[in-house]
Amino acid sequence: MITFLSGGTGTPKLIQGFRKIIDDSDIAVIANSADDIWMYGLYISPDIDTLIYLFSGFLDEDKHWGIKEDSFHTIEFLRKFEKNTWFNLGDKDLGLHLFRTKKMGEGYNQCEIIREISKKLGIRATILPSTNSHIETRIITTNDEDIHFQEFWVKHRGEIAIKKVYFKGIESAKIPAEIIQTLEKSKLVIVGPSNPITSIKPILELREIRRWMEKNREKCWVISPIIGSKPISGPTSKLMTIENLETSSIEIARIYEKLCKTIVIDVSDKNLQETIKEETNMNVIVEDILFKDVKIAENLARTVLDKGLNDAMNSKS
Ligand code: GDP
Ligand code: FO1
């Protein structure tokens, strides 16, 4: 089993590469739950849904959310009655949210619901929410407004000035038992190239996951979501800046050095290799990590599997 920690864009792109080499039944993903939001009376889990659509072949791979070739007639009609319709739900996508919300009303938890959806869509990979509790990423603006991450990112297109991020509900959130069971079965655990602040941090703030990785650092890897001084997409840089972090692969190494033995950085950042090794005691692999097509993700997957599984065998013998 290979397990990924994932948000909704960078890591799913990497997973596409792994799927070319290993069977879906050997892939598990611990997905960020803190983007979850109640909208129009329905419960939406964006990162989990991206993974559900990825593994079932429905994903719109241009937007990296929602269903390919979906239509938006329902949300258009809703606009006749409802002013606050900045969050777009596709017509087919709505089917999933209706089903999830119905099952939540019947008392099922997120793990159980995802398992049932996965079964019905023929998904063989294991998709796990980081927690069954409701947690949410909140952003404090410079005007002291406290808004949901989706309001910052979708309603305001990430264009407003912000000063703080926090995760509501994280202190009391528990991880599902399935997470440690899955980690224990994993030959490698890969922190994918996802936003370190709003996708991976809410997973790692769940103490049991962080502790497990600290204890099993040898088999944990991170793939940098940054090339040079920029992320490939999304608000990563803006969010790292308010956390007083520089946007670079060195900073990514510093964030994960206690949890991951190995980091993969881009070929264009090769000049950072020695500095990262000296500063962090990590192995540094240099590869093409810009997934312009699935072949590049597949090549990276091959390197990680060759080296990672080899290291695992050597550390046992
Ligand atoms: P979100 O939930 O949509 O924010 O998705 P993620 O957190 O999974 O992805 C956002 C991160 O993915 C950003 O930091 C990007 O830099 C990174 N990312 C997107 N595409 C690529 C890529 O092709 N290669 C790498 N290395 N990172 C990527
Ligand atoms: N992203 C947008 O930029 N605009 C939207 O209207 C939007 C709707 C949406 C609906 C369901 C879903 O699963 C995801 C959706 N997203 C949308 C993506 C979402 O905001 C993600 O980018 C974040 O949660 C980060 O992963």
Image: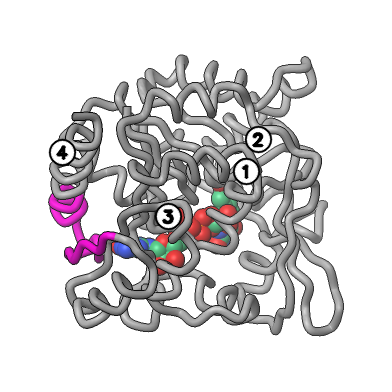
Q: Percent from the top left, x then y, of residue 222?
A: 36, 55
Find numbered disc 2 in the image and state the secondary structure of the residue it sits on: loop
Given this view, does label 2 or label 4 mark the residue nearer the observer?
A: 4
Element carrying mark 4: helix
Mark 4 highlights which residue? 310
* Helix, strand or loop status at disc 1: loop
Instruction: Sort mark 2 into few (<14), some (14-19) or many (20+) by Cα contacts within 10 Å.
Output: many
Residue identified by numbered label 2: 131
Tag count in the figure? 4
Q: Nearer the viewer, mark 3 or mark 1?
A: 1
Q: Is residue 269 magenta?
A: no
Residue 119 image position (x, y, % from top left): 45, 15
Name the quadrant where ligand 1 sits.
bottom left
Q: Quadrant of residue 226?
A: bottom left
| Circle on res. 9 | 3
The answer as to whether callout 2 falls within 8 Å of ligand 2 is no
Q: Is residue 312 left or right of residue 108?
A: left
Residue at image x 63%, y 26%?
A: 176
Which badge, 1 or 4, comes first in the chain's sequence?
1
Give the mark nearer the N terminus: 1 vs 2: 1
Asked if disc 3 is less than 8 Å from ligand 1, the answer is yes
- How many angstroms separate mark 2 from mark 4 (CA)? 32 Å
Q: Residues within 10 Å of mark 4 (few under 14, many from 20)?
A: few
